[in-house]
Image (cartoon, grey):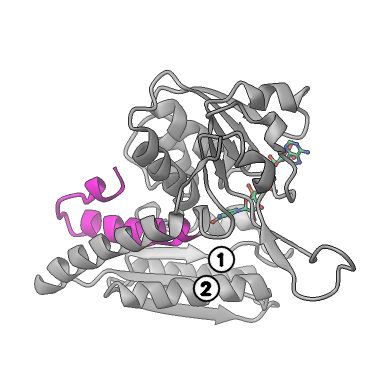
Amino acid sequence: MTAALLDGKAFAGKLRGRIAARVAEMAAQGIVPGLAVVLVGEDPASQVYVRSKARQTVECGMRSFEHRLPAETSEAALLGLIARLNADPQVHGILVQLPLPAHLDADLVINAIAPEKDVDGFHISNAGKLATGQRAMVPCTPLGCLMMLRDHLGDLSGKSAVVVGRSNIVGKPMAQLLLRESCTVTVAHSRTADLADTCRRADILVAAVGRPQMIPGAWVKPGATVIDVGINRIPPPGTGEGKTRLVGDVDFASAVEVAGAITPVPGGVGPMTIACLLANTLTACARIHDLPDPADLTA
Ligand code: NDP
């Protein structure tokens, strides 16, 4: 069997088109959603992400506010900026790019963002609301994964889902979302005994580990839907010299022969993450202005 490819790039392009149309409707009422992105330090990968987020924000008709701060920025200065963004009526979404330099307390900083502007969905209040089934701002990467799963499988109810990884930004919220869809959810991690068998039981297998190609096709249940969140840069085969390439946490070549459907890396989950960030910014703006909730966009 050769798996169907879940094309996140095309899916995200369509979602951005729908977002742009809603933004245009809002703009006609004099409301323009605005996203502020805060980057502390010069991490090269973060710089690429921030540039891409800013470009796509503007392309969708929203306002983009970029705040680039030096690596040695103090916690007080960063918290001061967040307080100003919380109070700024032109800003509806605030994203602090992670990781932060080691001297800054990421939990403290994230929890200083006004929950209604927390478009990453990492604030403790949004995490708690998601866990207790209340209306929350949902983290972008798991939201994008869920949209692709629903699009491909329809009703997820009763399916066995295994999420490998238990981080606060991917694994845990992914598990909460799948539980909300009435899946039977297992969360695996570095201490899981017999990870291979656990994975083999999954109708839906989500890999969010950060270890290149660690899940081989032999761990995939025939016909399963595989969502590969991992983004790992590895040297080219052979001498290891030359251009590096991106691979996921799943060994695509062997998994594609067993799975029913699979996301490629790149071009799978990655593009959906930014599109969902834009959707969350639109949602935050609608809620702040008491407009109808655009929840149907990400349903
Ligand atoms: P973290 O490092 O925060 O979490 C990794 C998780 O994997 C941990 O729960 C860890 O377990 C688990 N783990 C590590 N080694 C093993 C192992 N050998 N077997 C089983 N589980 C293991 O990573 P993130 O959640 O932030 O990111 C995961 C991956 O997703 C990364 O490659 C990242 O780049 C990518 N990513 C992609 C995004 C996208 O837009 N496509 C967005 C965000 C992340 P334990 O808790 O026990 O240590």
Q: Is residue 111 above or below residue 1?
A: below
Task: Tell whether 136 sits left or right of 161.
Answer: left
The residue segment tinted magenta is 271-299
Toward the left, the furthest residue is 29
Task: Tell whether 281 sits left or right of 172.
Answer: left
The circle on residue 158 is none
User: Residue 272's image quarter?
Assistant: bottom left
Residue name at image x 32 percent, y 65 percent = 92
The circle on residue 50 is 2
User: Are dots 1 and 2 in contact, CB under 8 Å?
Assistant: yes
Q: Nearer the viewer, residue 236 or 109?
A: 236
Q: Tell which tag, 1 or 2, sits nearer the viewer.
A: 2
Residue name at image x 38 percent, y 33 percent = 153
Residue name at image x 18 percent, y 59 percent = 289
Toward the front, the furthest residue is 1
Q: Is residue 69 above or below residue 36?
A: below
Dot 2: element: helix
Task: Tell whether 157 sits left or right of 3.
Answer: left
Residue type pointed to by label 2 = Val
Check disc 1 and report the residue beneath it: 97
How far apart marks 1 and 2 lie (CA) works out to: 8 Å
Dot 1: element: loop
Percent of width and height locating residue 10: 39, 59
Q: Nearer the viewer, residue 81 or 270?
A: 270
Ligand 1 under 8 Å from disc 1 Cβ: no
